[in-house]
Image (cartoon, rainbow, N blue to C red):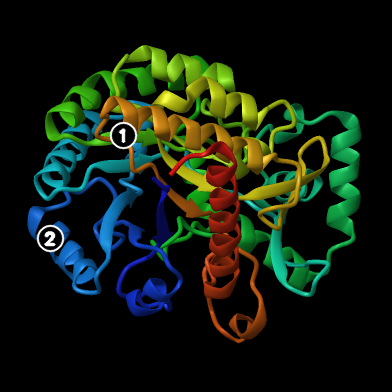
Amino acid sequence: MAFEQTWRWFGPHDPITLKEIKQTGATGIVTALHHVPTGDVWSRDEIMKRKTAIEAEGLRWSVVESLPVHEDIKQRGALATSYLENFMESLRNLGRCGIDVVCYNFMPVLDWSRTDLNVQFRDGSVTTKFDATAFAAFDLFLLRRPAAEREYSEVKFKAAKEFFDSLDEERKHRLVRTVLLGFPGSGEAYTLETLRAALQKYQGVTENDLRRHLQEFLRAVVPVAGEAGVLLAIHPDDPPWSLLGLPRIVSSAADIRQILGAIESPNNGLTLCTGSFGAGRKNNLAAIAEEFAPRISFIHLRNVKRSHEENFLEDNHLDGDIDLYQVMKTLLLEQQKRENSGRNDRRMPMRPDHGHLMLDDMKKNFYPGYSLYGRMRALAELRGMELGIRRALGIA
């Protein structure tokens, strides 16, 4: 048995069509109802409309990525209970429509973060990177977050100031646009003013508070997911460390143990994103895959090259600092165990996460990391590596 090969699609407005995706060899679609405002219920009608369109092309809606968790739930704000009820009703509706894997995240305010989306790679393609000094310059001198200087050492503050002073106005604007880029597929982005307002709402919310809020969320939604036949799979923080003074609590093996241990249920699972965890130098992806394999419900495969304590560049999928071979080998053995024991979650959906902008795609407008040819190349490479591992292990 092979992993279910999936592809992230942003819906009818995605420049890549379902017909094109089918030609990549992917059979499963990973998508979300991005047009539904965050916190609103996903109705059965809207879910079935999207599902029917996918199935009309001979594909399957395999995974929801993502069902957004409203900021009020993370903060335990005034409307947290109402938004929590809406989230649970969306889970019920997804289960009724036969969609059984839901990826979500618990990152406050910002989703994935980069400081440069137009990095010339060694082969002429375009990739993305995160540079801690550039991000500090944004935080200190462009966002001007109150009291931010207290969170940086004298050395880091000086480096950020020197970097900021080297920027012309266009590069400053580009850095702001990059950091404020919206959630993939939503088309929404912060302004400096709205970001400051969003951060203000987290004043006083500590790391322990956020962990407690996540546990309260899980205690409420995991039983509902179980009744609906839906596997919840939390996505790690990207990057896996605090940004803008906000706590991040899905960044390490210790974090995962705490989350999965909070509710011992197969419906409380993990999205293994090798790139997100892999940006952290202390994270051993092979060990993480080994320890948490039975609770991994969704797989994102990509690679990064770390160049400094908190700097990384998105590398080719089979290069970089992450041993994707060992990760995939571990997960294929886990899939065999699931198949032998008759588990319902043995298909183990996998997608190539991000891809370089390359070839004719350079003339087109894609959300960073989500071009056609870069991901098609990645999927082909991962497919080949999977076949080689399965043959070597004697797995049919």
Query: Hey, what amino acid is under mark 2?
Result: Met
Q: Who is closer to the viewer here, 346 or 95?
A: 346
Q: Residue at x 50, y 28 (%)?
A: 203
User: The N terminus lies in which quarter of the figure?
Assistant: top left
> Residue 108, image x and y in percent?
47, 36
Q: Who is closer to the viewer here, 147 or 127?
A: 127
In the picture provided, is 324 more to the left or to the right than 68?
Answer: right
Asked if 244 appears above or below 290 in the picture, the reply is: below
* Residue furthest to the front: 394
User: The C terminus lies in which quarter of the figure?
Assistant: top left
Q: Who is closer to the viewer here, 218 or 271?
A: 271
**Gap in angstroms between the C-alphas marked 1 and 2:** 20 Å
Q: Residue at x 65, y 60 (%)?
A: 176
Which residue bears the numbered disc 2? 48
Quarter-of-image position of residue 288: top right
Quarter-of-image position of residue 121: bottom right
Mark found first going from the N terminus, 1 or 2 = 2
Label 1 residue SS: strand
Count of labels shown?
2
In the picture provided, is 65 more to the left or to the right than 289?
Answer: left
Which residue bears the numbered disc 1? 232
In the picture provided, is 325 more to the left or to the right than 48?
Answer: right
Q: Residue at x 21, y 38 (%)?
A: 87
Q: Residues within 10 Å of mark 2 (few under 14, many from 20)?
A: some
> Residue 337, image x and y in percent?
39, 27
